[in-house]
Image (tube, rainbow, N blue to C red):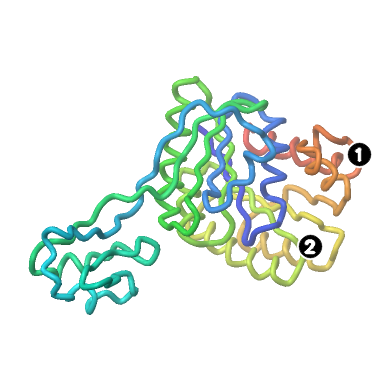
Amino acid sequence: MKELVVVSGKGGTGKTTLVASLAGALQRKVIVDCDVDAPDLPVLLEPQTERVFPFTGGKKARIDQRACNGCGECLRACRFGAILENNGLFEVDPIRCEGCGVCDLVCPSNAVTLQDQKNGEYVLANSRFGPFVYGALDPGEENSGKLVSLVKKAARDLAQREGLGFMLVDGPPGVGCPAISSLSGASYVLIVAEPTPSGLHDAYRLFSLVARYKLPAGLVVNKACLSLGASEALESKARDFGFETLGRLRYDNQAFLALNNRKTILEFTNTGIGEDMLRLVSKVRSTLYE
């Protein structure tokens, strides 16, 4: 099983746009969106849902009013302001509760329990480019790294059942727990960066993360024509880490028109940025299947 994981040091670099074009060009694969905090790939691929699985990534406290003796120990111990008192009755605000369990620990009457909490879901679906797996956290919920792991496991299981030997993964931006989880099992990492001050800074951090796990990687510079000097700086830094540059994508209004029509760049045009994307797809194929 080969896994191509596409990541970026910051959001908005064009990572998902690139993944969508690769999804239409590469064969016999499972498409995976691991950006569970903000999954955008389903908007573009318009998948048909087959199965939905709830994700339980944490716990919330609950107070049994029948067992509560009204001592208020939980209220005094909670550091998140999650315990509320109303006319001598104590209850838990689920929005504020972090599931730390201190209230359960200090309760002398065993009135507090920690209960599993649904934090999101992951979905098995079909798209016009093949099988598709993605996850989505509920608003304000955490444990996205755990959900990313479940999404990738579901995608691997699906690939095995369907006899597919390739996973195309749209990873979350940044260098935090979700990004690290998405890199687990990667055969090759495609790093998308843009030639801006914030793009340079965040790309350098991502280079360090990928190098730490000794993963083979390549760089794609998106909107490269915005600053040729910064593009060259990105490519130079990638070489310092032992990463090759697979291509540059120009800044082109056709990309926005394609997305407005819910099309990938390669579905929409073969000129301008379409030419750049065709060359990049060819390079990705030769890199992964050499």
Depth order, front residue of 237/59: 59
Residue 79: give x, y in percent of width and height: 30, 76
* Residue beneath the point at 85% across and 40% down: 274
User: Percent from the top left, x then y, of residue 180?
Assistant: 47, 55
| Circle 2 residues within 10 Å: few <14, some 14–19, many ≥20 | many
**Label 2: which residue?**
231
Q: Secondary structure at mark 1?
A: loop
Q: Is residue 172 above or below residue 198?
A: above
Q: Is residue 86 above or below residue 30?
A: below
18 displayed left or right of 137: right
Q: Nearer the viewer, residue 226 or 260?
A: 260
Which labelled disc corresponds to residue 5? none
| Towards the viewer: 106 or 184 | 106
- Which quarter of the picture shows residue 198? bottom right
115 or 212: nearer the viewer: 115
Q: Which residue is mark 1?
A: 271
In percent of width and height, residue 31 lies at: 58, 34
Q: Which three-letter amino acid code belongs to the residue tagged 1? A: Thr
Q: Amino acid at mark 2?
A: Ser
Q: Residue sitting at 85 percent across and 44 percent down? A: 257
Real-space Cα distance between discs 2 and 1? 22 Å
**What crowding class fits label 1: few (fewer than 14 Cα within 10 Å), some (14-19), or many (20 or more)?**
few
Mark 2: secondary structure:
helix
Q: Earlier in the sequence, mark 2 or mark 1?
A: 2
